[in-house]
Amino acid sequence: MSSTRSEYSLPPVFSQPLTAERRSKVRFPLALRLSYRNLGRGTVIAGEGWVTNMSRSGILVSSRQAISPGSQMELNIEWPTLLHGTVPLRFIATGEVVRSDASSFAMVLSRHQFRTAKRRVTSFDSLASSGNRAAG
């Protein structure tokens, strides 16, 4: 029984040339709200935006203002998971802006940590278990 090469051709996704990824860290696409502010003295820069993607060492932020490369910034990100199902978390990150344009900036992280947020959020799980008592 003879077989031809065409029977075993690669799917189209594998037949296109591979391009090398310049980044050494995997980036995860996200849509998380955040607020940001500059650190240090000088003109105050602050605003709100969205995390576009994130890796272990950097974050791309969609914003309404250009931030100068070299700026030291703090990001305060609303984390989507609740601690113990009830306590909202924030991901606080500091770092340096490495590139920027009119609608986004990329920041390399120097420090980061999770903190609990001040306001409490009721999880969907606790609403379901308590029935309709939460309405009202």
Image (spheres, rainbow, N blue to C red):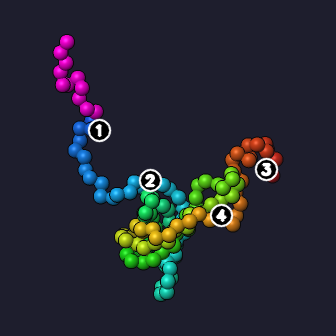
Camera-nearest label, 3 or 4: 4
Q: Which residue is mark 3?
A: 134
Residue 123 on the magenta segment: no
Which residue appears at 49% of the width and 86% of the height?
41
Residue 57 picture location, percent across and down: 43, 63
Magenta-drawn segment:
1-11
Which residue appears at 50% of the width and 79% of the height?
39
Examine the rendered structure and indicate whether residue 85 appears above or below residue 38.
above
Chain-order first, disc 4 or disc 2: 2
Camera-nearest label, 1 or 3: 1
Quadrant of residue 101 within the rendered picture: bottom left
Q: Nearer the viewer, residue 33 or 135?
A: 33
Which residue appears at 70% of the width and 64% of the height?
119
Query: How many other residues sit within 10 Å of disc 1, few (<14), some (14-19) or many (≥20)?
Result: few
Disc 3 marks a residue whose amino acid type is Ala
Residue 70 picture location, percent across and down: 39, 77
Q: Nearer the viewer, residue 43 or 54?
A: 54
Q: Which residue is mark 2?
A: 28
Examine the rendered structure and indicate whether residue 69 appears above or below residue 135.
below
Q: Can residue 44 be seen?
A: yes
Q: Which residue is mark 4?
A: 116
Distance between mark 1 and mark 2 Cα atoms: 21 Å
Marks 1,2: beta carbons within 8 A:
no
Left/right placement of residue 80 relative to residue 108 reads right
Disc 2 marks a residue whose amino acid type is Phe
Distance between mark 1 and mark 3 Cα atoms: 50 Å
Q: Which residue is mark 1?
A: 13
Distance between mark 4 and mark 1 Cα atoms: 43 Å
